[in-house]
Image: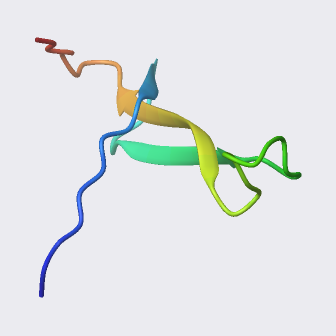
């Protein structure tokens, strides 16, 4: 089975939690021919407060 990969931007929020998780916000209406209501936007990655964020 071939895996599909996509690069997404996400806002990172540190919280007093044990396990990381993702949330998505969905657009409720068509805003242009390029974007549709079938996609998720504004991805947020929720991570525990003691996680260290490493960037390139």
Q: Please identify the quarter of the rendering in which residue 39 is found.
A: bottom right
User: In the shown orientation, is residue 4 left or right of residue 18?
Assistant: left
In the rendered image, residue 5, in percent from the top left (x then y), is placed at: 23, 57
Residue at the right extreme, as displayed: 29
Judge whether 7 appears above or below 49 on screen. below
In the rendered image, residue 13, in percent from the top left (x then y), is placed at: 47, 21
| Front residue of this view, candidates 4 and 56 | 4
| Front residue of this view, candidates 12 and 36 | 36
Residue shown at the point (16%, 12%) measured from the top left? 55
Residue shown at the point (18%, 15%) measured from the top left? 52
Tell me the quadrant of the picture where the N terminus can be found.
bottom left
Count of number-bearing discs: 0
User: In the shown orientation, is residue 31 left or right of residue 12?
Assistant: right
Judge whether 15 appears above or below 28 on screen. above
Judge whether 38 appears above or below 32 on screen. below
In the rendered image, residue 18, in percent from the top left (x then y), is placed at: 34, 40
Tell me the quadrant of the picture where the C terminus can be found.
top left
Residue shown at the point (30%, 50%) measured from the top left? 6
Q: Please identify the quarter of the rendering in which residue 45 is found.
A: top left
User: In the shown orientation, is residue 40 left or right of residue 26?
Assistant: left
Residue at the front extreme, as displayed: 33
What kind of colouring is applied to the model shown?
rainbow
In the rendered image, residue 47, in percent from the top left (x then y), is placed at: 36, 31
């Amino acid at each position: 089975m071939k895996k599909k990969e996509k690069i997404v931007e996400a806002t990172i929020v540190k919280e007093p939690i044990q396990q990381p998780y993702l949330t998505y916000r969905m657009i409720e209406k068509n805003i242009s021919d390029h974007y549709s209501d079938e996609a998720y936007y504004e991805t947020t990655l929720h991570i525990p407060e003691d996680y260290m964020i490493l960037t390139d």
